[in-house]
Amino acid sequence: MYRIFMLTRVAPYPASPAPGDTRAHAVVIGAGLGGLASAMRLGAKGYRVTVLDRLDRPGGRGSSIVQNGHRFDLGPTIVTVPQVFRELWAACGRDFDAEVDLRPLDPFYEIRWPDGSTFTARQDTDAMRAEVARLSPGDLKGYDRFLRDSERRYTFGFEDLGRRPMNELWELIKVLPTFAMLRADRSVYAHAAKRVKDERLRMALSFHPLFIGGDPFHVTSMYILVSHLEKEFGVHYAMGGVQAIADAMARVVKSQGGQVVQGAEVDEIVVRRDRARGVRLAGGETIPADITVSNADAGHTYNWLLRNQAKRRWTPPRLKRTRWSMGLFVWYFGTRNSRHLWPDAGHHTILNGPRYRGLVRDIFIRGHLADDMSLYVHRPTVTDPGAAPYGDDTFYALSPVPHLGFDDPVDWTAQAETYRQKVQNMLEEQLLPGLGDRLSASLVFTPDDFRNRYLSPYGAGFSIEPRILQSAWFRPHNVSEELSGLYLAGAGTHPGAGLPGVVSSAEVLAKLVPDAETVPGTMKMAAE
């Protein structure tokens, strides 16, 4: 098993502003997609922005690692709502499609069950209806109703609720009647079960919350909106992986006169007179700022970066009671001379174990590492041959597992290799026969690695779980409830995890941050 942590300092201490640059200064903690999107939005509003990140390259959970010529995309692999990126670039006076090569995928993914049946997801409605009819003809009318349900929830949940601030209680009260009308109290699975009878279709229409860290049997049915956004906008892959998007975002920040500093770990948010006044790095350097944005996990922000500050809402006991998303076990591996092999293994494949409800319960409720598993398999070389040496392949296989916050957490130091071998066995039996003879690179991430590399509480893969009472106003707000001058972006704040969510969090944040001209760009923190 091979592990790596890229925390080496690769950039100098941030330089002082150029002579004559009197713009208000914004510091962004973390160069994840939410932090970089926030930096771009702030740069467009006239701020001089400094992004500080502890890794060796931008992207956060969307960054990559190269091993033996294989580029492993560590986190998200698809773009489902490309217009959020196009709008972000447009806000900065630039053209996203001129800087990022986005390719539509067809099919999106294939779902496989132990009985040999399959379901291929595509954008074309007729093709999807044909798949439904092939599995369960009697569920066609219910599927059509489900799509209409999904569109209504997309319009309200994503385009309305997900793109505006939800930090005022009144904003929540105003939408409660709509929540009631759309039966937001019902779970994603329960809604799917209301529309279709076939258990395979129920799984195929309800598993999407797992992509953002949610239990399909408890997360609000508002998240069936994913089915509509996939159908309406397609599923895309960025050539070069999500790392290519992050690199392009960093270039935009620099073109605005900002800085993206890698290898710079923020240890604390500096507070003066009940206001965030900048940050202190792990090496002791202090960087003053007029506003501070944290793209670090919301739990890490409040529990550690503000550890010396009294909190009213996000206290340590409150954070401990919070329900966190599941953990992730991810095996990244490369194979040699395999491009011609495994023709049935497409860009994305979902392999189901024998259980659905029971496995999800083990992961989210019991905190039990089950013997069975389901896998999300990513083979980017189907679309992007440059992710591997010529003729070779790059993969990752992701298995949802319990996070580290249960009473008897999994000892991954002892279990990681055993579990990796189980993953390999399942792949060889169901998708990639002879895999063991072709391996040329191997890297494993467990919840331990998510905790240590990304500073994610309990090693959770997607921060706070998006249950109904942990969504919208109930999540940590984009403008901090604890401290003036502090703002939050990323998976742990509104609207939530996933690429569209974290990029939209920057859009929401930009509506809350004052225009740079109204903020005096004269920082006298030391004198205060």
Image (cartoon, rainbow, N blue to C red):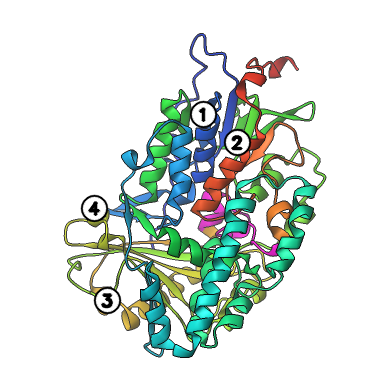
Q: Nearer the viewer, mark 4 or mark 2?
A: 2
Of residues 106 and 258, the one nearer the viewer is 106
For this orientation, the residue located farthest to the top is: 20
Q: Earlier in the sequence, mark 1 or mark 3?
A: 1
Q: Nearer the viewer, mark 1 or mark 3?
A: 1
144 horizontally vs 4: left or right: right
**CA separation in Å, label 1 and label 4:** 33 Å
Task: Please say if the residues under marks 1 and 4 sit with CB atoms less than 8 Å apart.
Answer: no
Look at the picture and state if 335 lies above or below 454. below
Amino acid on which disc 2 is placed: Ala
Q: Earlier in the sequence, mark 3 or mark 2?
A: 3
Dot 4 alpha-carbon crowd within 10 angstroms: few under 14, some 14 to 19, many 20 or more: some
Dot 3 alpha-carbon crowd within 10 angstroms: few under 14, some 14 to 19, many 20 or more: few
Q: Position of residue 229 (x, y in %)?
A: 48, 61
316 horizontally vs 86: left or right: right
Amino acid on which disc 1 is placed: Ala
Which residue is label 1 attached to?
Answer: 44
